[in-house]
Image (tube, rainbow, N blue to C red):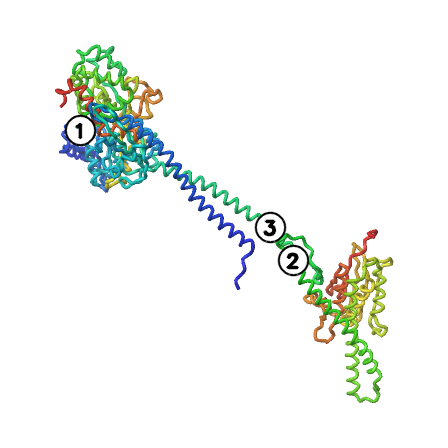
Amino acid sequence: MKCGTLATLTAAIVLSVATSAMAVEGARAFFPAVEQERGRLVVHGATDVEAMEPLIRDFQSTATDVAIDYTDYVTNDLYRDADAACRKQENFGDILLSSSVDQLVKLANDGCALAHSSAETEDLPDWANWREEVYGFTFEPSVMVYHKDFVPPEDVPHSHGELTDLLRFKPDYYRGRIGTYDLRQSGIGYLLAFLDAQQASTTYGRLLESLSRVEAVLRCCNNAVLSEIDSGNVFIGYNILGSYAYAAALRNPKLRIVLPRDYTLILSRGVLIPKGATRPDLAGRFLDYLLSDRGQEVARRKAFFFSRTGPLPDNVDGPPKLIESGIGRPIRIGPALLAAQDQLQRSTFIDDWTRLLRGSAGGKTP
Amino acid sequence: MRREPSLFSRLVVRVALVLCGGATLLAVAAWYYARAAADDAYDRLLLGAAIQITANMTVDHGNLAVALPTSAFELLGLAARDRIFYRVIGPDLKTLTGYEDLQTDLDLTSARSAPVFLSARYRDVPVRVVVAARALSDPSFSGWSYVVLAQTTEARRALAGELTSRAMILVGIMSVLALAGTVLAIRYSLLPVSALGAALRARDPQDLTPVDVDVPRELRPFMASINHFMGRLDERVTLLQRFIADAAHQIRTPLTALSAQVDMLEEDEMDEVGKRHLGRVRKRVGQLARLTNQLLSHAMVIHRSDSVRFKPVDLSDIARKAFRAAVPITVDPDIVISFEAPPGPIVVLGDAVSLREAIANIIDNSLRHGTVSHLAVRVVGGDGRARVEVEDDGPGIPRSEWESVTARFVTSKTGEGSMGLGFAIAAEVASAHRGAIGFQEKGEHGFTVIFDLPAQVEGAR
């Protein structure tokens, strides 16, 4: 039975979505129901299917008659398609998962979401819930990742300022060896950069300047940056989501994770039930599962490794109590994120960013 | 017939209606003011956010640039659940950024002097809109630019709802208190009515004097009417009594003559039929004489009860005189007749003549209608009471008739033609002396009529 399921799954994870040009993100996976299928939940997620799989499997063990059709998107594509479907009042999946919560907030603000509340949603902190429409179900610090073999211990940066100084003092060594998001392609990259600018504009300006000087490597997504570090092409990755970083560090013990000690942005991956959902009931059940203690525990152990309540995972360099120390700054899911989503703001910010990094970015963008 | 609703329910229902009406009116007013207050409070946030946005407008290389401040959205985010829509408009009236379809039918120029607020609908939800303008004057670029900022009204409605419901709770409490107060006040105000009713009910049936109860001004006409009516009734009754007394008096003289004439008739010359008829005539004449005497006695008793001042008298003495007067010498010798009285005097406050008349009537009644072989008259004192008990071995009066025999012209043996006034006289006298006539059923003793009076208390005079 188990072998059969696995075989079906392997066969299922093959289709690449035509609209997505990305090779790494943009896969479709089908998880058949454990027993007789009585309902099918269509999940559109800007989250790697590998990360979601343990959660989906565990959910299916509680809901044995539900099959799950999971499609992986890049955040911007997910937003574009969901927005278009909302405008045309069409169906676009039963539930949307995205690391780019600002885009989900924008969707909810535009009236594209269905409210859902239950006992599980009651316990969430305010910053992880807007209008009972957008919920944050993960706890993912934005971290720095370095390759132990190439970054000597004295070089390891413990804050944004230290990274800036490191790049300033050893620009030649790190030229082309610092990797980060390409804001033009990644919604979460833009959001993290925008919030960086909000948190500490001077530090951020100096950091951007340093990144420009060392001709930072820009990649669409977390995993692309991480694989560059894994292969030793890039020594330090900046603004990588902790969950991906930890998964990569588990695969390659030479990858080390640092939580900046001046401030650490904490992203709570968003989940939203779109207005056109055909099975909002199943979507609600899945949402409740994700927020439940059981779902949170599975996420902490197998998918996202960090949790709101638990301690930091092993081998992570950072303050033990993120929130209590005031270093961890959860990204509040709420209308303030609309400022980040303003198209003029966005294009101005990205233009400025591109202009600053153009020298180094031009040739290295895939 | 429809039952007339009580004064209490009339008042309560009307006051409750007024209170309900008032509460409804207050609810509407509370809702209206709460809405205005909520709008006012949240309008300030909206305006604050709009001002922040206009303040962030800059001219950069001849182009209008606006960096939307996060703080503006955080400000609006204080209304945690509300959605936000905005549109930034340049001097060429083209939308620079935001929701292009937001309130496109506005006259933007009106916002130049002061920000304009309006309520509208956007994307099928009610929104509150503010339009703020800013004049930009840069050498390379000048003109008016605008911000249209809209927010859904959930927080406003929630606040207004909360304020209204709190006001409603207060109004509700006040209404309940007012109603309770009204109920108490009405109950208190209506007390004199029941007091008047109780005073009338407690009156002696014979008492036709004006009612003297302290009543509120509003009830005085009503009481005056009652007293007026009582006065007229009293006059009528007095007239009637006087007429009866006069009539009885007028009848007595011819009746005496008639009686004498009847006695003079020669019986010997009559045949048997004639004798029988004469016997009947004699009997009827005797009855008539007795009745006339009773009517006169009744009239006298009433007259005396109105006019004679009571004095301390010895009830034993009076009873004895009455006993002598009532028991004729011609009484059947087979009947055992006894009179018992304690050795000392039993003093009551009263009119000796009326009392004697009353006791004599009771004894007479007993002799005529009750006594078969035994009659006992006892005078008993003690416990502040003075009683004359008249006991006979007759059949007695059934309990159901006790009430009615003291009324005029009723005897226990209806249809025998003897319209007795005896008990009526006795009852009249007893009540005039603040006493009463009582009966005791035939048991160990015979049937007993009790003439019960309050005794004169020692040293009271």
Residue B100 figure quarter: top left
What is the chain identity of the residue bearing mark 2?
B
Res. B189 mark: 3
Q: Which residue is mark 1?
A: A25
Label 1 vs label 2, nearer the camera: 2
* Mark 3: amino acid: Ser
Label 2, label 3: how far apart the Cα atoms are: 16 Å
* Mark 2: amino acid: Met
* Mark 1: amino acid: Glu
Label 2 vs label 3, nearer the camera: 2
Q: Are marks 1 and 2 on the same chain?
A: no
Res. B223 mark: 2
Q: Residues within 10 Å of mark 3 (few under 14, many from 20)?
A: few
Residue B397 figure quarter: bottom right
In percent of width and height, residue B265 lies at: 83, 85
In percent of width and height, residue A223 lies at: 19, 24
